[in-house]
Amino acid sequence: MASQPRPPPPPRPKTRGNYNCGRCGQPKKGHVCVAPVPVAASPSGAAPSPSPSTSSGAASASGGDQRRRRALSFDEAGTPSSPEKKPKVEPDAEMEVAGGEDDEEEDAVIEVGGRPVPREVMAEVLRRLGPRGVMAAAGVSRGWRDCAGRVWRAADELRLRVLAASGAGLLGALLPRCPALSLLQLRMESDVDATALACLAVSCPSLKTLEITMAANAVNRMTGEDLSRFVSEKSSLSVLKIGGCSNLDFINLCSSSLSVLWLSDLCSLSNSVMNCPNMSELSLCFAQQSNDCTDLVTLMDGIGCTCPNLNKMHISSNQLSNEAVFALESANLRGLSMLSLILGSKITDAAVASIVRLCTSLELLDLSGSSISDNGVGMICKAFPHTLSRLLLALCPNVTTRGIQLATAQLPHLQLMDCGMSLCANLNNDKEGPCLGEINGGIRIIRKLCTLKKQPVLQKLIIKHGNLKKLSLWGCSAIDALYVNCPQLNDLNLNSCTNLHPERLLLQCPNLKNVHAAGCQDMLVGAIRNQVLNEFAAAESSLPCKRLGDGSKRVQLPQFLQHQPSEDDKLSESSQIQCTMHRDTTRAS
């Protein structure tokens, strides 16, 4: 008896639908098919092509001639898995794939509290959070993680505080998520070394602005070699601000894109070379240490050769002297508009004459902590009467009220004037010395403390200016009388003006917004309140009265005779500037 052939196995039933594309066989999720549409009618004499909806069992029963393509097929040439024909998938775009009734779209909404929320809205909400909040939101669900990824990918500015326990590991985990980052501000509570700089160089390819500030207990361990390598690798870097650079033994920077450089807490630089032709702003702050051996003369001389387009310069060092300013003059930096040379007690009027010859259109000049006198202030006023708008002469003991009044009278465009601690009353005039000269012959020389005490020389200051907006007289204890007539003044600092008499104070500043009076006498504070806040004038104007014809008594005006304010008066009263008194210990510069 002939054996009967075994029937083919029944096809496997479809339970959850077809998740592969009917044209090319790739998964439908996130897929845009580029295969040609199958022809409905086959040419004459040719067998019809199988339908895309043919089941897998039918395909296997037909002998496997029309085998369905898999998502990853390495043994077939010309499949969509090859790099030439693989479609580009944008993660943020909405996807649509062909495949009949089984087509799927990428979820455009996520559930928040049981309600659907568009991903774009959720990403905009997460963008308002800080980095810590965005990282926490990424652990809620897959949809939240996708929204957090959108925030990181689209971020172009990041301000981050790095705790001591995190260190460079936080930077290595977070910064690769932000490929479009252009501005990065770091508040470091952990140490900074070459590892952190290398992480920044690799993770932020388009970084343009980098600011690193150090906490009090953190140490910046980067050396001059580390900084030079980082600047040379970042060809797009234009702004670099780093604090706590006490371990920089030298500066050797070469960059055509760097335009702003701030380095603070420097000490004992052996060599300083900054080959940055496009640099426009330079700030170098040296630590106030007696063992600092930086050669500022060589530094100033080299800046003019390597940074010819320098526009703003700030140098803070107790090693500043006239010779350093002379070297700056020989550098021929004619384009300077802002010059700040502070804490240079060896700078005198000779350096001021060199600055006058070098600069032609200064807008800001800061010589705080120098030894210039009223003659130097006169040279400044004569050289820059039409351009200088900010003049800072704090901690200049040789400047008197004559120089300050000369500056306010001959600089019509002046908007900021700082004379803090320049007008100080020296109350410690006790001198110990011999009351009798040296007498030979065995007579004993008696030395005693001289009991004569000099009274402090108090001065009167009168300032009248039409454009001055900020005046700082903090610590000017030598002023006992002050008259200020500045219609545009909005900030006045009188902190620690201990000898200023309330009866000899007159303020005529209608636009005054802030008055700092920390460390002043209570009577002086009351006098300032009366003149600035107009408390008594407001109380008197609130009770309209009229005297009788015989002059016997006052009576209140009837309601119909009282002046009705017009619309212009109401508008002017509503727009009246409210002044604030500050009695905290913070000095407002």
Image: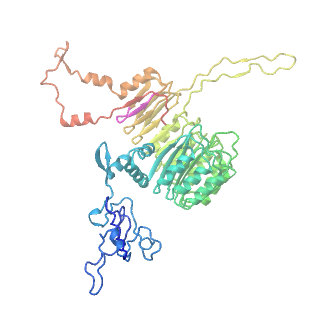
Depicted 429 relative to depicted 210: above or below: above
Tell me if residue 63 is in the magenta stretch.
no
Give residue 557's quadrant in the image.
top left
Tell me if residue 513 is in the magenta stretch.
yes
- Classified by dominant secondary structure, the portion drawn in magenta counts as loop
Could you tell whether 404 is left or right of 323 in the image? Answer: left
- How far from the left and from the top, in percent, is residue 394? 54, 37
Residue in front for this viewpoint, 448 or 138: 138
Residue name at image x 33 percent, y 60 percent: 94
Q: Is residue 311 visible?
A: no
Could you tell whether 39 is left or right of 69 in the image? Answer: left
Residues in magenta?
A: 508-517
Could you tell whether 67 is left or right of 100 in the image? Answer: right
Depicted 581 relative to depicted 418: above or below: above
Depicted 163 relative to depicted 524: above or below: below
Farthest residue in the left direction? 560
